[in-house]
Amino acid sequence: MELLINGMNYTVNPAAGTSLLMVLRDELDLTGSKYGCGEGQCGACTVLLDGKAVRSCRVPATAAQGKKITTIEGLEKDGRLHPVQEAFLKVDVFQCGYCASGMVMSAVALLNDKPKPTDEEIITAMNGNICRCGTYPRVISAIKEASKA
Amino acid sequence: MKEEIFEVTKLQEPEAEQQRAFSNSRRRFLKLFGGGIAVAFVLQDVSAFVPGPAEPVLLRAADSKEVGGWLHIGQDDVITVFTGKVEVGQNIRTSLAQVVAEELRVPVNSIKMVMGDTDLVPYDAGTFGSRTTPQMGPQLRRAAATARGMLLDMAAQEWKTAKSTLKLADGKVVHSKNKKALSYGQLTRGKELQQAVVNDVALTPVEEWKVAGTSVPKVNGRDIITGRHKYVSDMKLPGMLYGKILRPPAYGATVTSADVSAARAIPGVVVVHEKDFIGVAAPNRATVAKAADAVKVQWSAAPQQPSRSGIFSYLKKNVYNSGSRGGRGNTVKGSVMDGMAAAAKTLQETYHIDYIAHAPMEPRAALAHWENGKLTVWTGTQRPFGVQEELAKEFTISKENVRVIMPDTGSAYGGKHSGEAAIEAARLAKAAQKPVKLTWTREEEFIWAYFRPAGVIEASSGVKNDGTLTSWEFHNYNSGPAGIRTPYEVPNQLIQYHPVESPLRQGSYRGLASTANIFVLESQMDDMAALVGMDPLAFRLKNLQDARLKAAFEAAAQAFGWNKTKPATDHGFGIGGGTEKGGYTATCAEVAVDRKTGEVKVVRAVTAFECGTIINPEHLENQILGSIVQGLGGALFEAVDFENGKILNPRFAQYRVPRFRDMPAIEIIQLNRKDLPPAGAGEAPIVGIAPAIRNAIAAATGVRLKALPLVPNGLSGMLGKAGG
């Protein structure tokens, strides 16, 4: 089975029913996407499928075939951070950072879709991402910062 | 269940053992470097604490020769700090580097922090109790200032000049007259210098700080934001297996029979079955899952045990009376009988506090590897040396043969003091003779970690018509003694903590029991104010002499507009605050109540916080914010549901935590007291939000709630009865 991840083709051979998240993490060592709950409730595993945010713990790897998969590792280009990453860094959002990849990927998807989101649109798009350190207001600031770019 | 992980005796070391540990860590440390300047500091003025069932208890005065940390300046100019403290999101990797950078006049990024690796850093009891900033920070400052003195001495000798002609800048010692300069590394070349910290060394005054006291960004922020940082759950070793543990269906269930032959027959699978422990390991997760399914195990029925529905009567009836653990936090002053007799109004209330979960985003994880009888485990724990002891005991090997390494971890909040996953992974790795990684599922983290204690709290108080408190009686069953004392002036007090053998495994939590005690304290205070018809803020200030807490209340109230604005219809304002772990805080909250649905929304919250001198304003802001948000969950809806040994809501779909939509508009006021030493900030700011919300709900509706969480199902059914 072939997967197109961050512009590169990977041949993988996962067991039936294996989630995209576990293929990324275990087989391809793309560990930026995190396991947080395994039921699509926390958003730590968020990646983009054809530009849309999905919970990779709930997507069977087979369902991602033929789609463009973008993970946190694919945002940085030639040592240059994605504007959303820049904004998160500038706002110095995080504490433990475990939710960071999922937050950034959800934010990238939101801004792809709505470059100038309202507060309500940000909350709606981000509500599926949990941060137990409580950085939510700082995430919102960072998204607004990125939307100015 | 007993809190076996927190048994005090486990950490007691005889004197000789301490001495040996000291010389071992010293030898180990010196072996790392060919030369350079090494400054060690000892823990002589630091008492070591370990967490009790719910609270830290004084373990022992640390041996005076015990090393608390090292600072090293190498020939290559690299400045390395070795500390047993660990990073779980408090951003101490940054703040500790800041204070060292300040004293050595170098940029923060020239400091390398080696943290929580038992082979490399000196013993540390653990990262908890908001002790890093007030204890480790000043020690590192002194170590760095001592090193600065040594560098100046060396340069003065080298150039045969007075020290007064020299200054330090950007990692160099500069001669102010002839502009000669030598880097720190050049100065140390070929020499091996060791020094103990000079305790009265001159420190850079706070007013002159250029690096400390500023908002230096998270030092490894880029690794976090690119997904590059390797948490334990991300780590791999060559030939590594994945592990899985078979869990009993309920607490206390044991294995009655197990057939592991089918699992063992699967190629590549390793099975460990020892009494009630059954674990499997295999080269990939699919095979692990298959192997776990192939184990045929019968579990005994769980012993009858309390459920959530009966927990509060259970706690009241099962007080633990045996000696040392009883009666901690007790205060007796005057006579509460006299105090109640002197009161014009009295109030007697009972409050209930549910168990709640830490639910750190990274569930417990460990990667274990045995090599020539030596065990190395990478795991996310607040107590690497505690886990080292657990492992040494489990496998009956010396601590020198156990290395615990703690990479920066996906949060803890007091919930990762223990080494469950470390032991499990090590058992599997020992049998497999290969490295094994074990990552707990979210469900396992909810069920098999430990909880913030539930509690029953009885408060009984009396007040004169002019608002003067006359009596304060307070009994806490099981929550713990943190924050149990009233900060208010009351002539007659009886305050007692009554420990209980908790049916659920319980332990530390952010702010410990102060989340429960201060909630009750501040709820009761509000209701007393209402009894005598006083403004809640004025009532508090009238009975308060502690200037720092007063300042926090006044700052929060001012920023909030307390008494300056009136709440809209069906909105209410509430206030609450207190002091804990050297921090002083007050929160004002505004809630909106939907009278039709009973839904409560926290509209805004203003928290004022003071913890002495501020080391990093932006990261302090983040800690205060985190405390408010975490406190919001415990205040409004978090509760662990359980029945006869089973957790009924072990998933994020069932256990509600705060999300984006739950966020009020939050304003944070930092009170920077540069004249006071810095205190920790990760815990204390959590205590104000719950009572502030509770009191705001009372102001909006007249409903005076007496339980945490306050409104797991909104206020439906409660409105219209009381004053609504």
Image (spheres, rainbow, N blue to C red):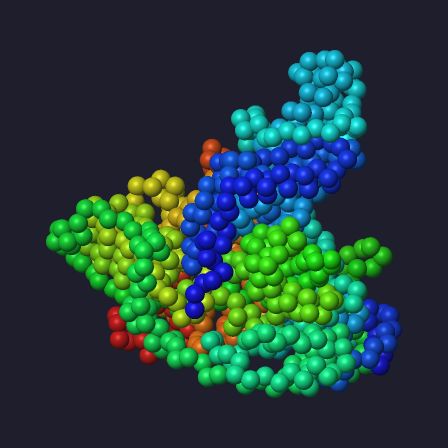
- Where A63 sits versus A90, above or below? below
Which residue is depicted at the point 45% across and 44% down? Answer: B60
The N terminus of chain B - image quarter: bottom left
Residue A102 located left or right of residue B347: right
Count all numbered tags in the image, as a single digit: 0
Q: Quadrant of residue B496?
A: bottom left
Residue B672 location in percent, x, y?
A: 49, 40
Name the foreground residue: B220 vs B127: B127
Name the foreground residue: B33 vs B331: B33
- Where B341 sits versus B654, above or below? above
Q: Quadrant of residue B32?
A: top right
Residue B171 location in percent, x, y?
A: 73, 31
Which residue is depicted at the point 21% across and 60% down? Answer: B347
Residue A134 location in percent, x, y?
A: 55, 60
Name the foreground residue: B553 vs A38: A38
Asked whether residue A75 appears in the rendered view, the answer is yes
Which residue is depicted at the point 75% across and 32% down? Answer: B35
The C terminus of chain B - image quarter: bottom left
Which residue is depicted at the point 69% across and 22% down? Answer: B152
Q: Quadrant of residue B153?
A: top right
Furthest toward the left, the residue is B341
Residue B72 located left or right of residue B567: right
Name the foreground residue: B111 vs A118: B111
Residue B442 location in percent, x, y?
A: 58, 72
